[in-house]
Amino acid sequence: MRKIPQIAEGIYYLGLNDRRLELFENIWPLPGGIAYNSYLITDEKVTLIDTVDSSNIDEYLSRIKLVLEGKKIDYLVINHMEPDHCSGIETIVRNYPDVKIVGNKKTFQFLEAYYNISRNLHEVKEGDELNIGERTLQFYYAPMVHWPEVMVTYEKKQKVLFSADAFGSFGTLDGGITDEEINTDFYWDEFLRYYSNIVGKYGSQVQKVLKKLNSLDIDMIASAHGPVWKSSENIKKVISLYDKWSNYESDEGVVIVYGTMYGNTQIMAEVVARELAERGIKNIKVYDSSKTHPSFIIRDIFKYKGLIIGSCTYNTELHPSVSSLVEKLRNMGVEKRIYASFGSFTWAGQAAKKLDQFGKDMRWDIVHNEIVEQQGALKDENFNEFAGIAESMAQKLSNS
Ligand code: FEO
């Protein structure tokens, strides 16, 4: 008889792995896939916490049926209405037409907008409780972590926080579900990539939710993606990383990103990187913005304090790949970076000025006053200008 795993007595894990999808939200690469997590609590009132992406909905439904052996689902709690979690709702409602859907006012607006479902609703407000038998669920709003309707659900008896996207990670769950069953080394970079790409724009809102969580005694964090955090060490770690990143705090190190057509801007970036290394900076990541997807570059920009962007001038603008990255960073409102920039051109320099203005717009700490730009290839006599970027960056980092 097939077994459905439990993360705690009476709490079944129903998540699905997706190794086929190339891009999450049709934007962010998934080289290690993704898990859509959903949980079923078998108490007097059977309660489903979120659903999954509908791509493999038959498998999901068959797991539910296997656990319930003919019983009905009484409640479906919707913590988040993004379709990677809620596109299974229609199937649940079709198969369990009496299920009461638990959400907040905004949840129900989105539920109607997406699926035209507006009956059997049970609205909850901040701090409300729902008794389901031996257990009681408590609901806390978590707006903009990552959409406005998001809430988290706290199960008081076993002290489980069902946290929606918060504390989630890219990457499938390859057998192990809780951190205690997994070598978690793989997940930490993907945990940051998920935070920075998906939740990173909403630092102040994350801070508000963390303050609410302070008052809860949490023995397990069951997120909507990635491992279930069960070890007290990892629960402390993921909360403290969220606190750090949502305050835009970061580690000593520098990301250098360049956009180039024929390699001259790359040479300038290499010079700056080498000069930083000679000044003792050990964490240096250099990226060609045409080669590496912004998802990974943004992850490292959240990780490290220093950021240096270089671009050739292309049709009087930034290189398109740099332009795309810059607009993403602007949209995310990344704060507290130490910044430098440089540019190159052949007949009319624009990139360096635009990158300098970008740093000013972001209110970052800009390490040099002069615009650094080079016509054509890097000339020996201009070497010091580029070395100067590294010198000022290293000094600012050591003083920060
Ligand atoms: Fe995993 Fe915002 O959805």
Image (cartoon, helix red, strand yellow):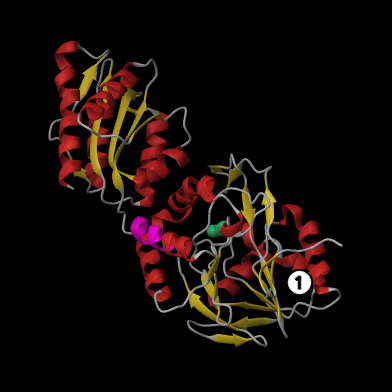
Which residue carries the number 1 mark? 93
Asked whether residue 121 is in view, the answer is yes
Residue 243 lies in the magenta-colored region: yes
Q: Please name the residue shown 79% across and 70% down the image.
A: 67
Q: Which residues are magenta?
A: 239-246
Where is residue 6 shown, x and y percent of the image? 69, 67
Q: Is residue 391 above or below residue 90?
A: above
Q: Secondary structure at mark 1?
A: helix
Q: Please name the residue shown 32% across and 36% down the image.
A: 283
Is 272 positioned to the left or the right of 120 in the image? left
- State ligand 1's quadrant: bottom right
Residue 280 lies in the magenta-colored region: no
Helix, strand or loop: magenta stretch: helix
Where is residue 287, by image quadrant? top left
The kind of residue on which mark 1 rests is Val
Of residue 350 and residue 54, the one placed in the foreground of this image is 54
Where is residue 340, by image quadrant? top left
Of residue 110 and residue 49, the one placed in the foreground of this image is 49
